[in-house]
Image: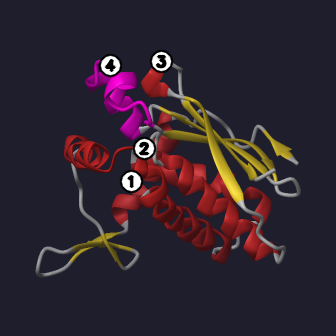
Amino acid sequence: MVENLGGFPPSLDKLKTDLKSILDKIKVDENGKMTFEGVRYVFVPQRWLMIIFMEILKVMGASVKTLLWPFISFSGATVANQLINRGVPLEKVFEAYAEFSNPRGWGLTEAVKTNLEKPEVVIRMHNELFSSWVRDNIKDLKSEFPFFESSWGPNWIGAVQKVIERSGRPIPKLVCEQVKFLALGDDYDEWIVGGEE
């Protein structure tokens, strides 16, 4: 078991350096298409993402958890797989994922606890992009969206699944519980991903 992974919070200098290294790898072709490591990127203001996100919540309601959130796990699995392919040891993937996320603006992320045997992984995000916007812009979240949870939880399920898969062990049915909610007044968002009892 690994606890209190990495140096947190990262220094402002480290965040600036990490962001600069990302920007230095962005290529722009003659048609104006921007790519980062071969993947097309676009800079989108937080407000635009949130308008889309809130409309999805209004249309799908609580079914968003069963219809949309499972697909978000693919993003976590993809990043975890890339990190493993780059040589990150399995027990350090969540720490590396946090370091990967921090300069990308999603929120300062820390891997609080990793126990791959159990499995149990605790992830904390400070000032998470979606939750901070919801906190600042939705007056009565409990009545407007009583089912609200940040979409990052399923992302971490995907990352845990990929790490367990790459370890060669069978993947148990994983669940994610959001135990802290920035949007509801906590200081940060926190998720616990573990095997279903």
Expressed as whole percent of the image width and height from the top left, the position of residue 155 reads 54, 56
Q: CA distance from mark 4 to mark 1?
A: 38 Å
The residue under label 3 is 185
The answer to which of marks 3 and 2 sits earlier in the sequence is: 2
Instruction: Determine the secondary structure under disc 3.
Output: loop
Label 4 Cα crowd, 10 Å radius (few <14 / some 14-19 / many 20+): few
Q: Name the kind of residue labelled 2 in the image.
A: Lys
| Residue that appears at 43% across and 36% down | 148
Residue 142 position (above or below residue 42): above
Which residue in the structure is indicated by mark 1?
Answer: 20
| Magenta-drawn stretch contains 179 | no
| Image x and y of residue 161, in percent | 68, 65
Report if the CB atoms under discs 1 and 2 are less than 8 Å apart: yes
Classified by dominant secondary structure, the portion drawn in magenta counts as helix
Q: Identify the mark nearer the N-term, 4 or 1.
A: 1
Q: For this rendering, which residue is in front, 80 or 155?
A: 155
Residue 44 percent across, percent down from the top left = 22, 52
CA distance for labels 1 and 2: 6 Å
Answer left or right for 89 relative to 47: right
The answer for how far apart the CA atoms under marks 2 and 4 are is 35 Å
Q: Are marks 3 and 4 in contact (CB under 8 Å)?
A: no
Q: Marks 2 and 3: in contact by CB < 8 Å? A: no
Q: Is residue 135 magenta?
A: yes
Nearest the eye: 37 or 69: 69
Q: Which mark is residue 100?
A: none
